[in-house]
Structures are given as structure tokens and as C-alpha cells.
Image: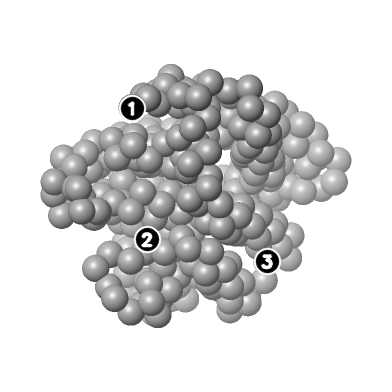
Amino acid sequence: MQLFPHGLYWVCWTGSFLLCVMAVKFWIPWCLRHNWLDQPGHRKIHHTPIALAGGLAIGTSLLVVLMGGWCLLQSGQLPSTLSNPLTYGFSERLLQVMGIALGAMLMLVIGLWDDRYQPSAGPKLLAQIGVALLVAASGVRITLFMEAVWLHYLVTCFWILLVVNACNFADNMNGLCSGLSAISALFFAIHSMTQDHYLVASLSMVICGCICGFIPFNYPRASSFLGDAGSHLIGFLMAITSILPHFYGENDASAWVVLAPLPILGIFLIDMTWVVTYRLTHRLPIYRGDNNHLSHQLVARGFPAPVAVGLLWLAQAILGGLSLMLL
């Protein structure tokens, strides 16, 4: 049996990181020229317009890496220890990969639409549901221990919408959403490596690298924001990488591993639960933004914003580490 070269994972991370850095440097001037900017205003702490380049940069770098990897794989120039497992992974998951790629593109478009036109919550939610159903139809579904296929679709759509909107909610302070997502993607990669899901682990490392390439432009001071395009795309990717490994199978030693995505995405889910509960309790619209997120709570208690974000990163990393105990 040939062993998969695990060094490739770090090649994936490094290549996607460098590509995203270059992509951000391309898209920031484009955003400035075309007025694709986040303007100062209510509840915003920046005093000058900031380029909404994050979603475009992450999406571009992700596309280039995946297309480049696919071309290398088809060229036949890769060693068999690398090409054989990846070829098998693509052959087994081709329809899923196509569904994920199309879903990511559509979710990015929904975010761009939101950035430009600020549609009401209803149409945006319907668009998100459409993308979630498309992805579920491609075979990317949460099955757990359920027999009914309609339940697979229902739970998968609910999960994708939950994670996408949790990431959108968490995009409220420089570096918060991007940093939490990078940490989550790393732990999804680790879980996939332990199960020998080479394609999923490689994809997770690519996602992690792309997001890390954006962070220097977003934290601690921001020359670019994710925008709704970025938070929608990242949220979709987090939802997908939490589904793909099929965290529980016949060979798993512990049935508790099925719960692993919850701590890996813990801060996102805790923050959303906190905010939604607060808004419902105070009879406020769920989708109306406010300053009651976990990050704002830390700042209100005297922590500088970059420190508050760093503390939440640390909490996410600790929760990710705890998820490994479920293996």
C-alpha cells in the first residue's frame, strides 16, 4: 500500500496562501477604482472607505489552486503516490466536487449582491436555500443515522444556512471571521487526515491557506474587508468541510466523533446563539445588526479590539483541540 505524501498538505497551504496574497493586492485597487467599498456609517468603526476585496480574493485564489491542481493531476506528471489517491478521490466525488464548486460560486454571487444592493432578508434566504438544495442534490449530504432521504436534504440545508449565517454574523470586527475560519479549516483538515480522506484534507488545507493569505490585510488594521461576499463564501466552505469527512463510519472507534464539527465551529455557533437569543428576548429583528456579539462584549469589558479578536481565536483553537478527543 502506497502512503500518501503528507507534505503535500503544506504545499497546498503555502501555495494557496501566496496566491491569495497576490489576489488581494490585485483586487484592492480594482475595488477602489470601481467603488466596491464599505463606506463609514452607523455601527462602523472605520472612518474611510475600505475595499470589499476579501471574497473576490479568496474566491479567485481558491479557483486558481483547484484548477491548477486538476490540470496537474490530468497531466500525468505527478508521482503515483500522489496521483492515485487523488484520482480515486475525484472519481468517487466528481459530482460532489462539481456541486461544491458551483455552490461556492453562487454563494459568492449572493454575497456580492448583498454587498451592492442590500436586499431584504427574505430574498437572500431563498437564494441561500436554493444553493443548499443544489449542493445536497450533488451528494454532499448529512446522513448520520437517518434512513429517509428527505431528512438528509432537510438537515443538510439547515446546517449550510446555519453556518453561512453564523459566519456572516461573526464578521463584525477586523480579522474575527477570517481568523476563526482559518482555525476551523485547519482542524477539519486534521480530522480528514486521520481518516485518510486525502482529497478532503487537501481541500481543507487549501481553504485554510487562502483565508490566512487574506488575514494580514484585515487584521489588526484593515485595508480590505471580507464583505458579505467573503463571509458567505467562507461560511459555505466551513459548512461543506464539516460535511465531507462523514465524521462517523463503521471503522470509527467512537460514535461521539459525529459531534466534532460543533466544537470546531464552536465560537461561530455560540456567538450566533447568543445574538439571536438576545434579539428575540428584546423583540428585535434577527437580521438587524447590533453591538452585542461576543467580540463587542469583550471590548465593553476593556479589551482592545485586536486583543478581543485574539482571545476568540484562542478559544476557537482550544475548542478545535477538544474535538480531537472525540476521535
> How is the structure coloured here?
one colour
- In this picture, residue 25 sits left or right of residue 211: right
Where in the figure is residue 292, as x and y percent of width and height? 39, 58
- Label 2 environment density (alpha carbons within 10 Å; few <14, some 14–19, many ≥20): many
To which residue does mark 1 refer?
Answer: 1
Q: Is any part of residue 295 visible from this angle?
A: yes
Residue located at (56% from left, 52% from top):
94
Instruction: Answer above or below: position of 152 versus 201.
Output: below
Which of 234/64 is in front? Answer: 64
- In this picture, residue 24 sits left or right of residue 172: right
Where in the figure is residue 89, as x and y percent of width and height? 47, 43
- Between the residue at mark 1 and the residue at mark 2, the CA separation in whole angstroms equals 45 Å
User: Residue 252, labelled with which disc?
Assistant: none
Residue located at (42% from left, 64% from top):
141
- Between the residue at mark 3 and the residue at mark 2, the CA separation in whole angstroms equals 21 Å
Q: Quadrant of residue 226?
A: top right
Q: Amino acid at mark 1?
A: Met
Residue located at (20% from left, 48% from top):
251
Quadrant in which the N terminus is drawn:
top left
Quadrant in which the C terminus is drawn:
top left
Q: Amino acid at mark 2?
A: Met
Q: Secondary structure at mark 3?
A: loop
- Label 3 environment density (alpha carbons within 10 Å; few <14, some 14–19, many ≥20): few
Q: Looking at the image, tell me whether mark 3 or mark 2 is earlier in sequence order.
A: 3
User: Residue 118, labelled with which disc?
Assistant: 3
To which residue does mark 2 refer?
Answer: 272
Which of 81/281 is in front? Answer: 81
Q: Secondary structure at mark 2?
A: helix
In contact (CB < 8 Å): disc 1 and disc 2: no
